[in-house]
Image: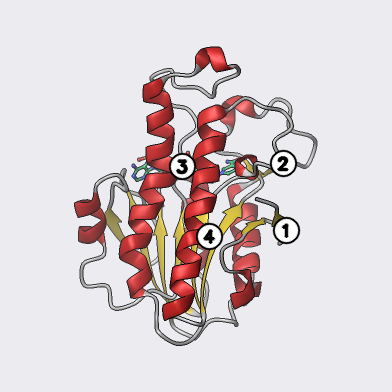
Amino acid sequence: MSTLASFNDRMRVLIIGASGAIGGALVDRLAEHPRVAHVLACSRAPSLHASAKVEVRPIDILDEASIQSALTGVPHIDLAIVATGLLHDSSGMTPEKSWRALDKDTLLRSFATNAVGPALVAKHVLPLLPRQGKSVFAALSARVGSISDNRLGGWYGYRASKAALNQIIRTLAIELARQRRDAICVGLHPGTVDSNLSKPFQDNVGDGQLFTPGFAAERLLAVIDGLEPAATGQLLAWDGQLIAP
Ligand SMILES: NC(=O)c1ccc[n+]([C@@H]2O[C@H](COP(=O)([O-])OP(=O)(O)OC[C@H]3O[C@@H](n4cnc5c(N)ncnc54)[C@H](OP(=O)(O)O)[C@@H]3O)[C@@H](O)[C@H]2O)c1
């Protein structure tokens, strides 16, 4: 388990997307951590967690009033992780293999969930980061959002919405640094993780390359623990490697 020693003791943590595979694993890891005093676990569908440290509240990241309501009365947050995301759904939305599949509604839905939602969350969470001492706002992004890393093509909406998220993170980081010297705002790529989101696309994943949500959560917390203010605005992978924009 990562030490989280770079943060003040008695940390207050916020996980958004607690019903998801990675979000849920983050909640459970953090709840059992001795340095964590409180975990606010927010999701659209209610999530179940055994620890008394966990407080569950509803949120829809596309509804700003719901974001405000989820944060009502929260005194401050040392670590916030946005673990929401959309790649496909049960109505038939699926990543585009060709420009022939481009569809307005699918593109707008990808941008809404993967870029607009996390931006609205940041709007209400960043003011809750402490003025002094290390704090982190992290959003789960994806390596495929890197423009320079795009060699395969396809997945237009997911790629472009994650690229937009990466730009939003960089822009938030610049503004945040003017107000809170010790605060860090990053995008994180969790690796390929066994979840509903990745399920239809797991066939070509190499041996040992499909992580459990628990492993990904542990790696992400280790990366977060190691972050220095100089890292703010960057996209980092589960192993701490910098991903070029
Ligand atoms: N799994 C991978 O291989 C992989 C790889 C690279 C990046 N990522 C990124 O990692 C993040 C987490 O993915 P995951 O694998 O854990 O997927 P997941 O299990 O499908 O979790 C995604 C979560 O996002 C939530 N969500 C979607 N729209 C929402 C909204 N409007 N308001 C509140 N919650 C909403 C979903 O909640 P509902 O249940 O209510 O829909 C779900 O709990 C995503 O950003 C994803 O892009 C994952």
- Above or below: residue 115 compared with residue 177: above
- Residue sitting at x 43%, y 17%: 92
Please state which amino acid type lies under the numbered disc 2.
Asp
Q: Which residue is mark 4?
A: 170
Residue 41 visible here:
no
The residues tagged by marks 4 and 1 sit, at their Cα atoms, a distance apart of 20 Å
Q: Which mark is residue 171?
A: none
Based on the displayed image, in which of its 4 quarters is residue 234 positioned? bottom right
Q: Which residue is mark 1?
A: 239
Q: How many marks?
A: 4
Decide if ligand 1 comes within 8 Å of the CB at mark 3. Answer: yes
Element type at mark 1: loop
Who comes first in sequence, dot 4 or dot 2? Answer: 2
Please state which amino acid type lies under the numbered disc 1.
Asp
The residues tagged by marks 1 and 2 sit, at their Cα atoms, a distance apart of 17 Å
Please state which amino acid type lies under the numbered disc 4.
Arg
- Residue sitting at x 63%, y 39%: 144
Who comes first in sequence, dot 1 or dot 3? Answer: 3
The residues tagged by marks 4 and 3 sit, at their Cα atoms, a distance apart of 19 Å
Q: Which residue is mark 2?
A: 149
The residues tagged by marks 4 and 2 sit, at their Cα atoms, a distance apart of 18 Å
- Above or below: residue 65 compared with residue 222: above
**Residue nearest the observer in this picture, 154 or 72:** 154
Label 4 close to label 2 by CB (< 8 Å)? no
Who comes first in sequence, dot 1 or dot 2? Answer: 2
In the shown orientation, is residue 90 left or right of residue 186?
left
Residue 147 visible here:
yes
Q: Which residue is mark 3?
A: 85
Where in the figure is residue 104, as x and y percent of width and height? 39, 22
